Image (tube, helix red, strand yellow):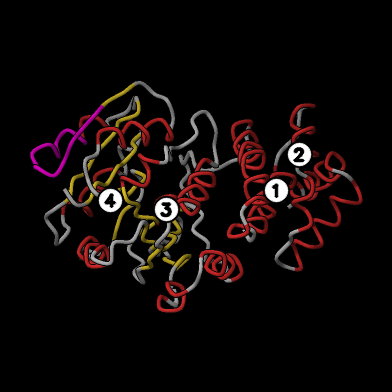
Amino acid sequence: MKISIIISVYNLEQYISHCLDSLIGQDFDDYEIVIVNDGSTDGSEEICKKYLSSTKVKYYSKSNGGASSARNFGLQKAIGDYIIFMDGDDYWDDSNALKALDNKMKEAPDIIIYGCKDRNETTGELIISRGNYDVEKLERYKKSELIEELVKENKFPGAAWIICAKRELLISNDVTFKEGIKAEDIDWVYSVLLFSKKIAFLNRTFYIYRKNRKDSATFSFDSKSILGILYTLQKWMPKIKENPDLKYLYYNLNFHFLLLVIFAKSFNSDEIKTIQNNISVLDYPLSLRNKILSQIIKILGVTTSNKLFSYVTSRR
């Protein structure tokens, strides 16, 4: 089996058919679709089971454990040489996507980074959020240069679903999704980049990410979001310091650190301690805006800055 597409599903009866139809219709044969129903309480299970008539589809149901748990479960069941993770409320808009990925796999990369479009659910507008890669230049770069270019050009892969990874890379290096937190994709992407020796790019923007869904469980700054970013800071600040190839990840972490301080409602004492222990990430702002925000936090401190930003955002 060449490719496994792992789809986590939780209460997506309105969207899952569109997702699965976009995959079943691929002009490529050597792949499987691994559906993991993460304890849905709506009609998602019934809809998913209708697709079992396709030999491409495997269906599993488990108790609710969150997106990370569902993805990790799916990885255990997948048998493809390459793994793709997909959210069940998203879809692909190119029936030749897998064929294009398969052609790229002939170069034997550890991972393939492709593009995506954001779909505004209010207006239906599609906007390319990742893509237009200078493939020849990026694939010629050393890893440190490649990460620098992606971060500077705002093309860094911020989500697992625009990366196709070798299953062996994930299994042998125990690259899984941290369970019990949000923002888990940050850690996963960093890990994949760390262990990849050959990184390829595909200039196709077939992945469609739905934005502004009213019922979306997508990132919001609750306690699990705070925990997720703090976990990433604690894990990766020392790793980046030890590995020169990863140094530009500091700038990506700065962005997530700023999001945390700006949008979190408040912090407990342990969270404040972890933030203070990693405060040096403020020395790596990429843009003028981030530099100004970083300086504000340095001058006012984390708690006061958080209260100030919360007040400003609440007035909008």
User: At x 24% / y 45%, what residue is drawn?
Assistant: 17
Left or right of 306, for residue 249:
left
- Residue placed furthest toward the right: 299
Q: CA distance from mark 4 to mark 3?
A: 24 Å
Q: Is residue 12 above or below residue 202?
A: above
**Amino acid identity at mark 2:** Ile
User: At x 20% / y 30%, what residue is drawn?
Assistant: 46
203 part of magenta stretch: no
For mark 1, give the secondary structure.
Answer: helix
> In the rendered image, which quarter is residue 106 located in?
bottom left
The residue wearing badge 2 is 275
* N-term mark: 1 or 4: 4
Q: CA distance from mark 2 to mark 4?
A: 36 Å
> In the rendered image, which quarter is residue 209 located in?
bottom left
Residue 210 marker: 3
The residue wearing badge 4 is 82
For mark 2, give the secondary structure.
Answer: helix
The crowding category of the residue bearing disc 2, from other C-alpha atoms within 10 Å (few below 14, some 14 to 19, many at least 20), is many
The residue wearing badge 1 is 257
Residue 4 marker: none
Q: Nearer the viewer, residue 229 or 123?
A: 229
Image location (x, y in percent) of residue 15: 31, 44
The crowding category of the residue bearing disc 4, from other C-alpha atoms within 10 Å (few below 14, some 14 to 19, many at least 20), is many
Q: Nearer the viewer, residue 264 or 170?
A: 170
- Asked whether the residues under the numbered discs 2 and 1 touch, taking CB atoms below 8 Å apart as contact, a structural biologist would say yes
- Asked whether the residues under the numbered discs 1 and 4 touch, taking CB atoms below 8 Å apart as contact, a structural biologist would say no
The crowding category of the residue bearing disc 3, from other C-alpha atoms within 10 Å (few below 14, some 14 to 19, many at least 20), is many
